[in-house]
Image (cartoon, grey):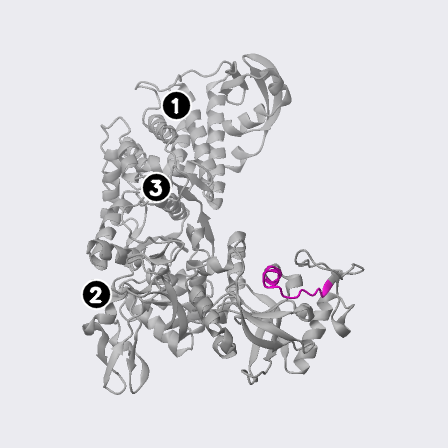
């Protein structure tokens, strides 16, 4: 096979090399995966697909180029690797752009995708572009609709009332369209309130307990904690309070509360309902009506975050009605307060101010009684409290709790629950913070929900053979309101598939997280028209071996993807219950100002500019070298020149081993007393120790230390360049290993050097990326100790025994930590450290500046 190299090129010119090899790889289809090939083990590597917002910035590269290194290394290790690419193409930014500029969402989105395809290809990543998906295309969202119908049949999809943000002029708003502390509409500035609408949900709570387990998968601990906190599983008791009758309230109503501390029930001195609780209207005394209605209107204008803020002053209104505490028949007042939310628990709490900080603060504000019912054994439990006593210790006992006083708190709680259960007023229960997934969006740029509304037949699912329900290509935003589909007669007007009568389509669209809850399955067969994915391929390739992306998606995309997989498994559509075997979250590259990169902040770094100066390989290596992959940090281009210099040196040692061209460093002479054979053997050991280090680092994605080791090997080669060692087999082996190790990280220069090497040997070209990953020699990397003399300014001051094969950076850390070395530095600054490989280290100092 002919190589597309230009052997006369003597200097490293990435802007000439990289486009040529990218074109060659595309021409040969080198990154196309035969998903039906069973001759090699499958390895599915996936990185989170992009929203097509416009230009890529360096933060996108920070996740994608290391993931490409994973894919390339696995191919060289004998796996049949699938590494697809696509675009998460629905979403609010396209609509905002349409409203501001008049460009339709579809046109804006597809234009951005075209631009991003070009930028993504410039990385030189090994994506299988034949598997590309674009979620706003009907051939993808048709299957969102198909899944919705399966969920509806199984009782996993249902319709219920839920609050939305409402503008009096523009109707329903997305959360992002509510701005400022005053919660105003982003378009007209009108105050935004909450309004209940009928909306669609997926029943995620059915899987709450299973979502807390991670059997057979590698999941970061902080991710498990984040999801556990979001799910919020709590064990306790569900207790029923009867409403006391009076002149305006005949009684008979009951209020259910959930508590994790049934042992404190005797300390409940009032009850608080969320302003949205369905019993508020009924339980409000006529004389309190105006005050209650005003308070509820005010609460509707607040976000949940505002309502739960601990630092703000408490507020609330008494309804004028009372509940009966089931353990002592005490009548306690019922209040509404916005620190209780309708979406958590039952939307009602029994307030125990002595043992809950929020309840204590509210009681202090409202002048309500505080009764202590839990104390440490032997502790004085009478007298006023200056703050809530909420400690949980093993020696807590109940006080002021009638016949339960003196019991250990935990035992008392169990007995109180059992006594209530006998009377039908309570029971042990488990509750969750997790709520069912609200998938309705009152805006047009999303997957149409496949149901119609018929006056005769009610809600009627769209028959499968009529899918997809096609979204219009254009929307009229001129009429105001947030969802132009409502006014699109051609879309809304249809017929009922059951009775043939007139019907109207659902104008809500699906949350875009639906798109990203199964997309890796569609990658396996993007053109399939008879099913969402090929079941035979799903069984072979899933779950995904390695998933990479941002930790900020932990409790939305990642949680929903896990729910979706479990639901599809229960429906018999997939064989797995977890979508990804291993998850790795990279850190985040921030702008130079320390804020998240975004065009609106003006702090993005355009990778195209860096490619034009240094080439894609230098950018890739620099991002992997700048620190641990899971940490990230503020962007700074400082240091990229050093990485680029490393690639130039690599170019030199491979193509000009004998030093015919001008040398970058002094080389060509062996150290005094070192024979050619000894230097060659040490070079071979260095190459194999580097290979061991790089191989091990690939397993844990330690790119920065991997690249450091490759730099050390290149430095070792440079020191011997021009010497007799450069003509020996050991040199040829070391440079061969260097190219193979560099290939996953810097694919273009590795391919060019490999092609030139083959051409020089008269061999037919074959890609370096098709070579097998080499094995290191255990004998050559066996640990050995060397005694290393340490000089300070040329005078011997110390020596240390260290393992052979440490990098220069590791040696420097050891040397500078030595007490005798630090004593001889005597406050001077280290100017440089000179290494004579394996023989000595000399620390050179300069006087410290005043």
Q: Residue at x 28, y 64 (%)?
A: 170
Label 2 or label 3, whichever comes before in sequence order = 3
Q: Residue at x 47, y 54 (%)?
A: 582
Label 1: element kind: helix
Residue 742 at x, y percent in the picture: 38, 37
Residue 449: x %, y % from top left: 31, 71
Circle 2 SS class = loop
Mark 2 or 1, which is nearer the eye? 2
Q: Nearer the viewer, residue 811 or 631?
A: 631
- Which residue is the site of mark 2? 479
- The magenta stretch is 359-374
Q: Which mark is residue 58?
A: 3
| Relative to 16, 821 lies left or right | right
Is 795 contained in the magenta span?
A: no
Residue 234 makes an appearance in the image: yes
Q: Is residue 191 left or right of residue 223?
A: left
> Going by the image, does 350 lie left or right of 506?
right
Cα separation between marks 3 and 1: 39 Å
Q: Decide which of 591, 669 is in the foreground and name it.
A: 591
């Amino acid at each position: 096979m002919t190589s597309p190299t230009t052997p006369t090129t003597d200097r490293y010119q990435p802007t000439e090399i990289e486009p040529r090899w990218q074109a060659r790889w595309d021409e040969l289809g080198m990154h196309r995966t035969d998903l039906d090939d069973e001759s090699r083990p499958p390895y599915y590597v996936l990185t989170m697909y992009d929203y097509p917002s416009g230009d890529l910035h360096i933060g996108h590269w920070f996740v994608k180029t290391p993931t490409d290194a994973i894919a390339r290394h696995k191919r060289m290790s004998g796996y049949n690797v699938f590494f697809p690419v696509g675009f998460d193409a629905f979403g609010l930014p396209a609509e905002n752009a349409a409203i501001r500029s008049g460009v339709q969402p579809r046109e804006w989105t597809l234009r951005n995708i075209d631009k991003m395809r070009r930028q993504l290809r410039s990385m030189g990543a090994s994506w299988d572009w034949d598997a590309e998906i674009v979620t706003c295309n009907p051939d993808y969202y048709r299957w969102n609709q198909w899944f919705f119908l399966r969920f509806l049949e199984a009782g996993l999809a249902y319709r219920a009332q839920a609050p939305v943000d409402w503008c009096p002029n523009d109707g329903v708003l997305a959360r992002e369209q509510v701005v400022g502390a005053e919660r105003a509409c982003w378009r007209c500035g009108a105050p935004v309130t909450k309004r209940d609408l009928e909306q669609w949900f997926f029943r995620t709570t059915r899987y709450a307990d299973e979502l807390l387990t991670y059997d057979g998968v590698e999941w970061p601990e902080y991710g498990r904690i984040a999801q556990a906190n979001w799910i919020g599983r709590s064990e306790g008791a569900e207790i029923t309070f009867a409403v006391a009758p009076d002149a305006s309230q005949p009684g008979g109503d009951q209020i259910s509360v959930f508590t994790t501390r049934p042992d404190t029930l005797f300390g409940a001195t009032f009850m608080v309902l969320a302003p949205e609780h369905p019993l508020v209207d009924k339980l409000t005394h006529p004389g309190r009506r105006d005050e209650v209605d005003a308070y509820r209107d005010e609460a509707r204008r607040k976000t949940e975050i505002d309502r739960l803020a601990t630092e703000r002053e408490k507020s609330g209104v008494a309804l004028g009605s009372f509940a009966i505490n089931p353990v002592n028949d005490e009548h306690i007042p019922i209040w509404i307060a916005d620190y209780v939310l309708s979406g958590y628990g039952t939307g009602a709490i029994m307030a125990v101010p002595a043992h809950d900080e929020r309840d204590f603060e509210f009681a202090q504000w409202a002048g309500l009684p505080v009764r202590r019912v839990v104390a440490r054994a032997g502790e004085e439990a009478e007298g006023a409290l200056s703050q809530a006593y909420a400690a949980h210790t093993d020696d807590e006992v109940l006080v002021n709790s009638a016949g339960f006083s003196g019991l250990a708190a935990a035992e008392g709680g169990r007995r109180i629950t059992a006594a209530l259960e006998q009377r039908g007023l309570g029971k042990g229960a488990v509750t969750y913070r997790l709520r069912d997934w609200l998938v309705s969006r009152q805006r047009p740029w999303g997957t149409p929900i496949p149901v119609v509304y018929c006056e005769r037949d009610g809600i009627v699912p769209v028959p499968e053979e009529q899918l997809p329900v096609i979204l219009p290509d254009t929307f009229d935003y001129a009429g105001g309101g947030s969802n132009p589909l409502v006014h699109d007669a051609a879309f809304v007007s249809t017929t009922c598939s059951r009775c043939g009568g007139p019907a109207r389509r659902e104008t809500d669209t699906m949350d875009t997280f639906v798109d990203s809850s199964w997309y890796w399955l569609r990658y396996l067969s993007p053109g399939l028209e008879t099913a969402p994915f090929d079941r035979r391929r799903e069984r072979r390739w899933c779950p995904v071996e390695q998933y990479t992306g941002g930790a900020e998606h932990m409790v939305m995309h990642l949680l929903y993807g896990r729910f979706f997989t479990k639901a599809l498994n229960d429906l018999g559509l997939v064989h797995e219950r977890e979508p990804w075997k291993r998850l790795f979250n990279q850190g985040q590259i921030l702008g130079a100002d320390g804020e998240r990169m975004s065009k609106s902040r003006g702090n993005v770094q355009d990778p195209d500019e860096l490619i034009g100066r240094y080439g894609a390989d230098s950018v890739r290596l620099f991002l992997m070298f700048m620190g641990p992959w899971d940490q990230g940090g503020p962007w700074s281009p400082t240091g990229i020149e050093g990485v680029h210099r490393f690639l130039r040196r690599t170019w030199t040692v491979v193509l000009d081993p004998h030093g015919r061209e001008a040398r970058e460093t002094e080389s060509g002479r062996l150290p005094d007393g070192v024979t050619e054979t000894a230097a060659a053997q040490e070079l071979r050991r260095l190459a194999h120790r580097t290979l061991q280090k790089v191989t091990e680092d690939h397993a844990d994605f330690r790119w920065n230390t991997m690249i450091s080791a490759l730099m050390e090997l290149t430095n070792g080669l440079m020191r011997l360049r021009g010497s007799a060692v450069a003509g020996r087999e050991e040199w040829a082996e070391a440079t061969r290993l260097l190219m193979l190790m560099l290939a996953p990280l810097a694919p273009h220069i590795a391919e060019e050097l490999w092609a030139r090497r083959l051409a020089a040997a008269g061999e037919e070209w074959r890609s370096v990326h098709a070579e097998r990953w080499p094995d290191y020699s255990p004998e050559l990397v066996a640990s050995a100790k060397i005694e290393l003399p340490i000089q300070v300014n040329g005078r011997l001051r110390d020596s240390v025994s260290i393992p052979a094969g440490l990098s220069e950076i590791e040696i420097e850390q050891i040397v500078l930590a030595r007490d005798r070395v630090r004593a001889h530095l005597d406050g001077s600054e280290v100017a440089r450290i000179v290494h004579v490989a394996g023989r000595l280290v000399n620390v050179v100092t300069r006087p410290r500046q005043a």
